[in-house]
Structures are given as structure tokens and as C-alpha cells.
Amino acid sequence: MDSDMKESPASVGGVALASSCPYCHSAAIRPRYRQHFHKINPTYGPFDFFVCAACGCGFNNPMPSNEQLKSFYSSYSSGMPEEYRSAMLEYEDSSWHSQIARDLVDLAGKHRLQPGFTWLDVGSGAGEIAGKLSKLAPASRGTCIDLHPAPEYMQDSQVRWLQHDINADFSRDVAEKFQLVYASAVLEHVVNPEKFLINCLKLTEPGGVLYLFCPDYSSLASKVMGQKWPYYLPGEHVTLPTKKSVRTCLDGISRSGEVGEINFRVGGKRISYSVQYMLFALNLRWLGKMLPFNFSLKFPTGALEAVIVRL
């Protein structure tokens, strides 16, 4: 635990602090970083960052308000800064979006979903994964859900687009259930991960699969890089889960009986990023400009994946 960690006050700026961990509900939480601003938008903040001694996750405390989050994301193009999207698309065929889409097709095959399986992309961003998945599994029927309207290039596609706040009880407003539900690089953005996972599972058909991909705060990359870890984005990545925190949260959901029985596995994952994108994320884009070519590698960036089967 960092040397600057101290006992926390009851509130910050008049906003009441959470008294327990958003994943495991332990009261053993302490501040790690104080008054940090967003790395890309230095006017967004400041935020305090807490850690849980029981499950190891990190989270903003207090969380940004809904108004703060909506205002912040309104400055993005479909959920992501244009600088990041541009850097990512420089080597699109080997991007993490492509890898996740291929992994989802493999997952559907492993769980014996028929070619016409239905899927839901929760927190779709600009629909990058949805677009690739619909091409890889053309007989499937896809739906996206996010706070903003469908990007222009998705408006004429066969993928349905629903506008809902994924920090709310969005499952109440979606009548259909799906055989495959996925949330890729989304869990770290939601203020109540337990409620989010329950909503995702309520939209998963019995016998269907929920897939999650997100940062792992217990990873070696996180421990070595500290505040410079690319996934540490105060006010945007409002929680940083660990494998233990996700398992504990899913255990609690399973015991509650709210979504019936589930089986799950949680493990580490290496993901494909282009070198140019990684250098951009590390604020080293000047070095990327000196490289005569680009290529992609599965970097040990410190991520996890979870596969949850609703029985």
C-alpha cells in the first residue's frame, strides 16, 4: 500500500464517501491517490482513488455524478477520444476489437450456439466489435446498447441500436433475452458493477453466455506502472477490478438468487494492440513516429476476462 495513504474523511467537497467496496462490500477501504485529474482532459476532476484490502480492487470515491459522467462522455465521439480511436485504427485488422470479435465467435461455437444466435453488445461505443462480429457471424442477430445514438455508419446496418444508460437498470427496458451478451472494456466505466452485472445476466437467456473483458488491477503491469498504467483514468475508469473482486461479486450474485444459477470462470488475458496504439497510450507517440512500420502484439497490459454461463 502506498506510503501516502491515510485515513479518509467522511466526505469530499460535501459529497458523502462510499463506506464499502463496490465489488465485495468490505469496509476495509483506504485512499491511495488524492486529487488526480483525467490524463487526457486535465479539467475533468479532481478525483480520489481508493483500494479495497479484501479483494484488491480500486475505485473513485466519491464516484462521479451522473451529470459529470454524461457531460464528460458528451465530449467524446461514441464513447472514446478521437485521438485514441485514430491511434487504434492505424492497425485495425489486428486491433483488440478484432480479437474480441473472433473470441466471441469461438465462444459461441464452444457453447454450441446455433449460427442464428442472438447477441447483445452492452456499452457498444462506436460499435467496432459489433460491426466485426456481424461480419464474422452473418447469420447471427445483433443488438447494441449505449447512452448515445448509433454512429452514422451503423445506422443502415442490420444491427439494432438501443439508447439506454448502462449505469441504470437498463434490463427493464429491453424485452428480449439473448444467447450471447458481452461487455468489452465496459465494467471499469460503471459506477455500480454489481447492478451492472445483474442487468447483463437478466438479459442473458438460460443456457446463454455473458462475456466480460476489462482491466485487472491485480496484474503485474498495474503494480509496476502504478499511476502510469494506461488503464488508470480517474473519473472515466471509475472502478478497476481484480480477478478476485470479479469472482467475489459473481459469487454474491449467484448466492442472491436474483438471476438463478450461474457458472463462471475468471482469468487473465493478453490482448492485441498495435505498437503505435500502445506508444500513444503511454504518451510516447513521438517514438512511434520514428518507427518505419507498425505491427501488433499481444501485450501483457494487465487485463482479465470472465465467462459466465446462466444455467
Image: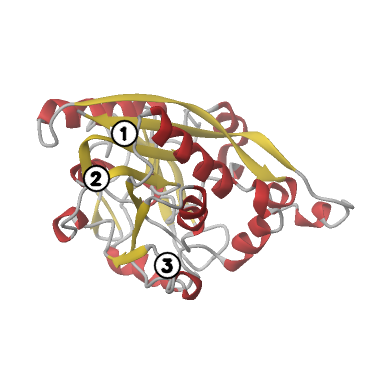
Q: Residue at x 24, y 45 (%)?
A: 18
Task: Name the quadrant containing residue 24.
Answer: top left
Q: Residue at x 72, y 49 (%)?
A: 279
* Nearer the observer, 95 or 43: 95
Task: Name the quadrant containing residue 19.
Answer: top left
The answer to whether residue 215 of the structure is visible from this angle is no
Label 1 to label 2: alpha-carbon separation: 9 Å
Residue 71: image x %, image y %?
A: 38, 72
Q: Residues within 10 Å of mark 1 (few under 14, many from 20)?
A: many
Residue 111: image x %, image y %?
A: 35, 29
The disc label shown at residue 18, or none? 2
Q: How is the structure coloured here?
A: secondary structure
Relative side of 219 to 159, left or right: right
Task: Name the quadrant containing residue 289.
Answer: bottom right
Q: Residues within 10 Å of mark 2 (few under 14, many from 20)?
A: some
Name the amino acid type tagged 3: Tyr
Q: Residue at x 77, y 45 (%)?
A: 295
The disc label shown at residue 242, or none? none
Q: Which residue is mark 1?
A: 29
Q: Residue furthest left?
A: 257
* Nearer the observer, 9 or 276: 276
Label 3 to label 1: alpha-carbon separation: 28 Å
Label 2 secondary element:
loop
* Nearer the observer, 22 or 61: 22
Residue 249: image x %, image y %?
A: 26, 31
Name the amino acid type tagged 2: Ala
Q: For the residues carrying marks 3 and 2, which lies nearer the camera in this image? A: 3
**Marks 1 and 2, the one that precedes in the sequence:** 2
Relative side of 116 to 100, left or right: left
Label 1 close to label 2 by CB (< 8 Å): yes
**Marks 3 and 2, the one that precedes in the sequence:** 2
Q: Which residue is mark 3?
A: 73
